[in-house]
Image: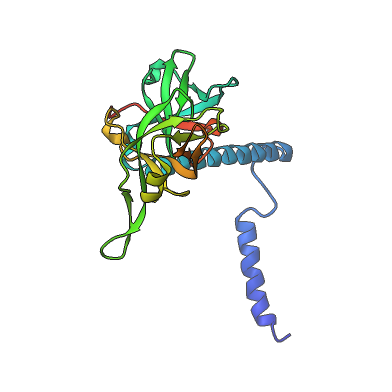
Amino acid sequence: MLFAPVARPAGAIAAFFFHRMGGDRSDDPRDLATIRNENEELKVTVKTLTAQLAELAQRNAEKEQLGNIGQFCTPVAVVGADPGPREALTLRSSTIEGIKEGLFVIYRGGIVGRIENAGVAGAQVLLATDTAFRVTGSFAAFARGAGGQLEFRKLNAPPVLIEGAGNSLGNGSMVVRVLTLREANDYKIVPGTSVIVSEPDWPLVLQGQPLGKVVEVTPRPDAPLYALIRIRPQETLKRLREVMVVTKGQ
């Protein structure tokens, strides 16, 4: 009985609120089954809205990761990859959205390619890994600055021609063929070295955008004194599900 004085007020308070809130009585004319069905529908709606919100957050994060270039882009869904020998993607877009031939396409990892044709039904992107793709690029890497901080800067190597490798070295690669093995060694071009755009004919907003990283430096089979520098994008371009078309700033 020691706790009875405390238990009684607590019980009275609980009873008061129970009856105040209606207890087990409800003025809702709907039956229990209807209420449960509506609750399930609400749960589905909440899950759908949550997923949509997460997707929007991801898109914004990708735009931020691209830096200032994100403000010049339009996100577009990918329908699928070209089933043939070409390195290409088909986009779910139309000319009404401002998608037209010649526009550049990027993703959070850098350059994807360029719109080859566009129409009402969609558009096709020629990937940077296709044999028909050409761009001038530079090698870059992180190095210690004067204050000891890491800085991302170009190597002393001159700008070089980057070519899509197509199926010759397996899908998803680009190559550099114009440097000798000695030059590649002198410029310290090794696996892990970054490759960025330095194409004078491309828009300013694309200068410095990543193309990929060096994965291999070997002698060219047809010219053993020259290097075959193999480059891979951050992701397999043919597996992308969404890209960003640079519709402004060109």
Give the camera-side residue of 224 and 60: 224
Rendered location of residue 19, percent (x, y): 64, 58
Rendered location of residue 94, percent (x, y): 44, 17
| Quadrant location, the N terminus | bottom right
Give the camera-side residue of 1 and 181: 181
Is any atom of residue 154 visible in this view? yes
At x 60%, y 21%, the residue is: 83
Give the camera-side residue of 116 and 22: 116
At x 67%, y 70%, the residue is: 11
Rendered location of residue 88, percent (x, y): 51, 24
Whether residue 213 is situated above or below residue 128 in the rendered picture: below
Q: How is the image coloured?
A: rainbow
Give the camera-side residue of 173 and 76: 173
Count of numbered tags: 0
At x 61%, y 39%, the residue is: 42
At x 62%, y 41%, the residue is: 43
Rendered location of residue 2, percent (x, y): 70, 87
Is any atom of residue 65 visible in this view? no
Instruction: Judge from the rendering whether residue 118 lies leftward or rightward of residue 43; answer left or right.
Output: left
- Most extreme residue toward the bottom is 2
Q: Quadrant of residue 81?
A: top right
| Quadrant location, the C terminus | top left
